[in-house]
Image (tube, coloured by chain):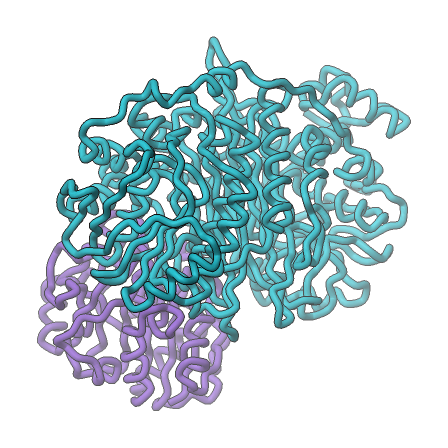
Chain colours: A cyan, B purple
Amino acid sequence: MNSVETKVTVEIAQKLGLTSEEFDKIIDIMGRVPNFTELSIFSVMWSEHCSYKNSIHWLKTLPKKGEHLLVEAGDENAGLIDIGDGMACAFKIESHNHPSAIEPFQGAATGVGGIHRDIFTMGARPIASLNSLRFGDLDNPHTKKLVKGVVKGISHYGNCFGVPTVGGEVFFDKVYNQNILVNAMSVGIVKVGETVSASADGPGNPVFIVGSATGKDGIHGATFASADLTENSADDLPAVQVGDPFQEKLLLEATLEVIKTNAVVGMQDMGAAGITCSTSEMSAKSKTGMRIDLDKVPTRQKNMLSWEILLSESQERMLIVCKKGQEQKILDVFDKWDLECEEIGVVTDTGFIEFIEKGEIVAKVPADPLVLGGGAPVYIREYEEPAYIAKVKDFDIDTVKEPNDLVATAKELWKLPNLVSKRWVYEQYDSMVRTNTVTTNRPSDAAITRIKGSIKAIVMTTDCNPAYVHADPFTGTMIAVAEAARNIVCSGGEPAAITNCLNFGNPYDKGVYWQFVNAIKGMTAACEKFKTPVTGGNVSFYNQSVSKDKTEPVFPTPTIGMVGMIEDYRKSMTLDFKKSGDKIYLLGKTRNDINASEYLRNVCGVSLSPAPYFDLEESFVFLENLGKVIASGLVESAHDISDGGLFTNLLESAMVNNLGFDIAFENNIRKDAFLFGESQSRAVISVSKENEAQFMELLSQLNFDFTALGIVKENTIKINNIDFGKLSSWKTVYENTLGEQLD
Amino acid sequence: MKFGVVVFPGSNCDHDMYHVFSEVLGQETVELWHKDTDLKGLTKDDCIIIPGGFSYGDYLRSGAIAKLSPIMKSVSEHAAKGGYVFGICNGFQILCEAGLLPGVLLQNAGQKFICKNIYLKTTTKNSVLTQKLDTNTSIKIPIAHADGRYYIDDAGLENLVKNDQIIFQYATEGNELSNDVNPNGSVSNIAGICNKGRNVFGMMPHPERASEDVHGNLDGLGMLESLVLG
C-alpha cells in the first residue's frame, strides 16, 4: 500500500477503525478528502486508545483537585504530587492487555517499559513499580502459558531496567481466559521545579527524535487496542511491540542527564501512535505546529512508507524539542550514552503538523482537532442495567448451608489460587534494587519505598476486587478505593492520591457502559471522601472473550493505584504477629455477610451475589480511627481484612514468624460469615500485654468497634477450641500451591 | 581506602554501591565510566567495585561484552598490581568472563530469575572481605539474578578448595550446607570466591541490600566494613 496511490474512501476509513460520521468530520476539518497517510493519522489519534472518545465525558467528572497535586489529570504524562522537602512524586498506571493476551512476554514487557517512560519523560526517576494482573482459570493450560509469559516479560524488562517491582496483585477467574489484564504502574521522584513538560513552545526550535530506530513493529497498535479481541487477533501480531530494556535504561539515564543541560524545551515519550501522537499532542498543547522530515528519522528497515514511520510504535523512543542554538548539548549527552539522536524537524507557528518526504509534503494535518481536549470526537454512550444484576440482587444467604466441618471448609478455601502466596510470581521480580525497599523484611499491606537522603517514604498499593465490581460497579469501585486506602493506613501511611486503570468490555454494549458509568460514580464518591484525587491513568475498553456463539466481557476492573506518604519510615507498620502471648483484636464491625467472597464464589460455587457489605461513611471513620491507633505506637501489627476474610488474614499474620493463634468468638453471626466473609472496613491488630490497657483506653476514647479475639500462640491454630492442625502444613500449601501448578 | 564504582551502560546497582560506600560507610568514592581508562587516582591500596545490573544488556552472555570495555583493561592492571577488585552479581559474572576469577556463571537451574533472601555460610576468614565475619553463624543476604549458577570443573574446584578461595556458600539459617537451600544449582553451593592472590572477589548475593536500618537487615554491613578496614 502506498500513501500516494491508495484512494481514500469511506470503506478504507472504516477498515482503519473510523466510522463514516468520523470520516465526514475529517473531510470537514481538512476542507478536502485526506490522503491515506493523513487518514491514518486521524485513525490512530481518534482511536479509543488515544482519544478516550467514549470515556472522556465521564472521566471529567472524577475529582481532580487536592492539596498535594502539582499538575491536574491529563495535563502531563503522569500525575504529580508534592511530597514535601522540595520533592514531588510522579506516578501512573496503564494497561497493556491486548498485546499481552496475544504475545504475553513482549506485551507485558513493553507495558512496563511504556509506563516507566511516562514517568521519566517528566524528568522523574522511577523508583518503584507495581503491577496488577488478571488471568483466566488456572487449570486451563492456556492460562498457565500466559502467566509464565507475562511474569517473565515483567521480570525481564523491569529487572534489567533496574527499578524494583515492589507490589501488585494477581487474580484468577475464568472471565479472563481469553482476555487477560496486565496493568503496570510506575512511581518516580523529581525535585519540584525540575520537571519537564510535554510542550513544543518556540517556533524555530529544533525537534529531535532520540532512542531506538523506528521499525515496522506495533503499527496500528492503538487501533488494535481499540477493537474487540477475537480468535483471529493472533493474526495482528505485528501490532505487538518488541521491547529492549537495555535501550530504555540508557534512555532513562540520558534523558535525566539531558534535562540538567537546560537545553530542553519539552519532551514526550512515544507510546501509542508513535511520532504522530507525540508531534500532534506537543503541538496542540503549545498551540504551535511542527514540520518533520521523515527522511531523517532513523529506521530499522529500508523503504518504510511514510504512514508506517508515522504509526510505528517501536519502543524506547522520545521526541525532544530543544532550545535553538543549544543542539550540541543534547547531541553530546546522547552520544555519551551511545543512543541515536537525530534532528528531524522544527517547531512552527502554523498549528499544523506537516510531514515531509523527499522534499514533498506527504501529510499536513491541523494538530488541535487530532487530540483529546481538542477536536477529537467525544461520545456519550447509552447505558442500562444488565440483566444479571437482577440475579445478583436475588441472592439470599439462607440458601447457602452453613458448613458442618469448618476445618475442611477452611482447607478448601486456603488452596484457592486467589488466596495462596504469589511468591512464584514476585520472586521473579527484583524487588530490592536501588536499596530503598522497606518492606522486604518488614512485610506490610502496602509497599514502602524510602526516599534516599531522608526518612520519608512513599507507600504504594494497587487494588481492585473485580468480583465485587461485577456484582455492583458503584459499591465495588468504592470498595477498591477504600481497600487501597486501608492498605496504606495499615502500613502506617497517609493516602494522598490515586491513578486508575479502567479495564472494561465494549463501550457500545449498554450493559458494559452501565458498569463503566457506575464505576466512575463510585470512584468519585470514594475519592472525594478519602481526599485522594485522581491524577490520571488510562482506559482500556474492548476486554472480552469472543467465541462463535457469544461475547462475554471481562469483569469490570477499575484498578486503583494509590500512593501515600510516611513522614518517618521507622514508624511504618507491619502485618506479622511478633510474639506468643500478644493479644489479637478485630477492629471494625463484622456483618452476617458472605457476599461475593472467595468462599461463596469458589468454595460454595455461587457466582452471583451482591458486593460485600460496605458503607462509605463507616469506612471513612474506621480509617481515621485505625490511623490513630497505629500512630499511637501501641500496636505490634496491623493487617487489613480482605479476600478470604478473617481466617486468611490471621494465617497471613501468623505465618511470617512461624507463630500461630488461639481465638474464640461468640456472636449471632454465622460462623462461615465471621471467618470467611469479606464485609468491609475491618482489620486485625495485635498488641502486647504491656500496652493492652492503654490500647483499650484509646479504643474507648475513639468509640471504636472491636472484638477481642484471643492470643498469638506458637504451634497452635485454634478457633473456638477446634484444632486446625499445624501451621507448617497450612504454610506449605500457601507457599507452594501456585508453583506446583505452574512449574 | 578509596572506592571506585565502575558504571557500564546497563549497570543498575552502581548508585547503590556508590551510596553504601559514600553515604553509609563514609568512604571517599568515585564513579568510573566504562569508556575511560583513567582510575581517577585510585592506587593499589584502593578498591574497584564492579556493580550489579545488566551491563550492555547482558546481550550475548552475562558480562561477555563488558569484559571488552576500556575500563576493564585498567581494572585488570589494577588487579595485577595487587589492588582490590570486588564484583557483585553482574560484577561477579564480568570478573569471571574477564578471567580475573576462575569459573563461570550459568543460567539458574530453575531457569528463572530469583530475588529473595538466602543464607550464607562464610567459608573462610582468610580474606579482607571476610576477616571480621564469623564462620560459625550464617548471614542473611538477598540474591537477585537469572544467571547465578557457579560452575567450575572438578580440577578447578579442587584448586579453589586447596587455595581456600571459596568465601561464601549457600547455607541453611543454621549455617549448614544443603542442596535444598542451593537457590541456583551452583557447584558446592558456591556463592562467592576470591582469586589466588586474595585481592579480587566476586559474589552473587547483594550485601548492599542488607546494610542499612531501612532494609530491616544489617547482615551485609559486616563484610563491607571488613573491606573498608583493608
Residue A657: quadrant of the picture: bottom left
- Residue A299's place in the image compared with A333, above or below, is above
Q: Residue at x 66, y 42 (%)?
A: A274
Residue A38: quadrant of the picture: top right
Viewer-closest of A49 and A331: A49
Q: Can the viewer see residue A561?
A: yes
Question: What residue occupies the far top of the structure in this picture?
Answer: A549
- Residue A32's place in the image compared with A287, above or below, is above
User: x, y percentage for residue A456?
Assistant: 51, 69
Viewer-closest of B133 and B8: B133
Q: Is residue B215 left or right of residue A470?
A: left
Q: Can the viewer see residue A128?
A: no
User: x, y percentage for residue B147?
Assistant: 30, 56
Viewer-closest of B107 and A536: A536
Q: Quadrant of the N terminus of chain A?
A: top right
Across the whole image, how many numbered discs are drawn on residues? 0
Q: Quadrant of the C terminus of chain A?
A: top left
Q: Residue at x 74, y 51 (%)?
A: A344
Residue B223: quadrant of the picture: bottom left
Q: Is residue A283 left or right of residue A406?
A: right
User: x, y percentage for residue A247?
Assistant: 52, 54
